Amino acid sequence: MFKYDLIIIGAGPGGYTAAIRAAQLGLNVACLEQEPALGGTCLRIGCIPSKAMLESSELFREANEKFSQHGIVLPEVKLNLATMLRRKEQVVGILTRGVDSLFKKNKITRYLGHGRITGVGKVLVEGQNGNTGLEATNILIATGSKSAPLPGVETDGDRIGTSTEALSYPEVPGHLVVIGAGYIGLELGSVWRRLGAKVTVLEFLNRILPGMDDEIAAEAKKIFERQGMEFRLGARVTAAKAKAAQCVVEAEGSTPLTCDRVLLAVGRVPNTDGLGLESVGIKLDEKGRIPVGDNFATTAAGLYAIGDVIRGPMLAHKAEEEGIACVEKLVTGFGHVNYNAIPGVVYTQPEIGSVGQTEEQLKTAKTEYRKGVFPMLANSRARTLAQTEGKIKILADAKTDRILGVHLIAAHAGDLINEAAVAINFGASSEDLARSCHAHPTLGEALREAALAVDNRTINL
Ligand code: NAD
């Protein structure tokens, strides 16, 4: 029986980051992962491969539609999808192997196999060549999530599939139907639209991107429609079946659709299969999540959980923050996550970024606020990039001027939003942001102008 200070089940961004931090703090750490490659869904079949495909497909679109504006004339732009897919796999390989190196550097013991809790402080690693029993003072569950199924939608791992299949279609579908206008549907729908597919998005609600600020989501929909994406809102999908060479998708509020491929993207559910939680008396909540207290402790002694298996947004960076806070609290007695300063990014073109409260949340809470909006059209750097679509919105407390929320659709919004997250984390006012010198010409100046707009004193509009 091998004994550790901490056993972490799952080597996704939450688990591997927690393992490294715990090792830095002097713990003897083991990390269990059932997949041969480390890095979890995010690195293997999520954030990283999708961003690689988003980058490649956007370059393809620009070469077709935008290069000529810059005076770059290409005789003919051709797609080599096999090369594009190979590059994506190379990016994934480099990053997952990088986690292996980090584990070696930090002296973290890695076990390949499925982790099953068998009692307080006890884990069984079920590997291909037999089982290994482990013991630990503390155990941290970081097993992430998997695609949510939808009754009536018969996924076949090929033509009717999830994001995993949509990252590797061997040819550009003639017509792709996407079920769900959330993060995954819009990102992967964009990839195949740019590569030439007709894309129809069926969304149950009467809007896209639920949870995001309404004004920004409405702007996004207009832009995506200009890019050729078709939306059917108020369409609740009830069935999807593969029939001969085609798929048929049925939805309430929409005529049936015949297409080549279907991407199911209606959310994700926590991964707790075969974890042995019953052996320590843990009962899942109504959404299948592991209930935890403030310091990520479950109801079982010495058992903690972070990331997609617990409450809160299913985001890699949220899991990382929680992993660090959890092990720091264990070792030092202090550990904290500011859930109000966790940004969300949709990596479409333009990207969409959001942090803090939306305007709708402020209205519901009857919080008095002031609002500053600045269009990217008036930002000089956006003009030089020929990426002037979108806008930035800052919401600040009407009395204290403290920034409560920042929402933007703009080129490189995924990078711009981090400045807003830092501002919120430090309790900055819109005046603080407005009085911070921003380099010229940069996209970040638009964020400053939006902060000036809170007080009706933009300069460049
Ligand atoms: P999501 O929750 O973002 O969106 C799912 C959408 O499906 C919703 O708009 C919902 O109304 C719709 N829907 C549900 N049932 C439906 C039905 N029967 N018919 C039609 N529409 C229906 O989920 P997702 O896009 O699958 O993403 C899953 C998770 O992965 C999210 O929690 C997200 O945070 C995470 N993710 C994040 C990123 C990123 O950070 N860039 C990228 C991908 C995924």
Image (tube, helix red, strand yellow):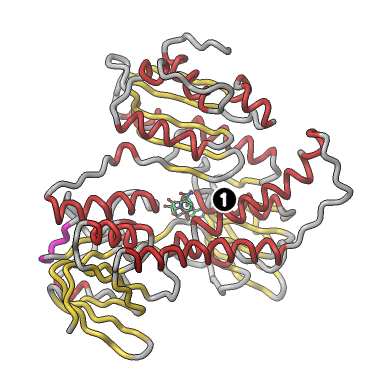
Along the line of sight, the residue nearer the viewer: 133 or 392:
133
**Residue 268: x %, y % from top left:** 42, 59
| Residue at point 34%, 64% (across, down) | 105
Which quadrant is home to the N terminus?
Answer: bottom left
Q: Compared with residue 168, is residue 312 higher up or lower down, i.e. above or below? A: above
Along the line of sight, the residue nearer the viewer: 299 or 288:
299
| Residue at point 48%, 56% (across, down) | 266
- Magenta run includes residue 323: no
The image quarter containing residue 440 is top right
Prevailing secondary structure of the magenta residues: loop
Q: What span is colored magenta in the figure?
A: 297-301
Q: Which residue is denoted by mark 1 in the rendering? A: 187
- Magenta run includes residue 299: yes
Q: Classify residue 18 as left or right of residue 57.
A: left
Binning the other alpha carbons within 10 Å of mark 1 as few (below 14), some (14 to 19) or many (20 upward) gives: many
Along the line of sight, the residue nearer the viewer: 189 or 61:
61
**Residue 197: x %, y % from top left:** 72, 55
**Residue 51: x %, y % from top left:** 56, 53
The image quarter containing residue 364 is top left
Q: Is residue 166 visible?
A: no
Q: What's the amino acid at mark 1?
A: Glu
Q: Is mark 1 within 8 Å of ligand 1?
A: yes
| Residue at point 28%, 81% (across, down) | 125
Which structural element holds mark 1?
A: helix
**Residue 87: x %, y % from top left:** 63, 62
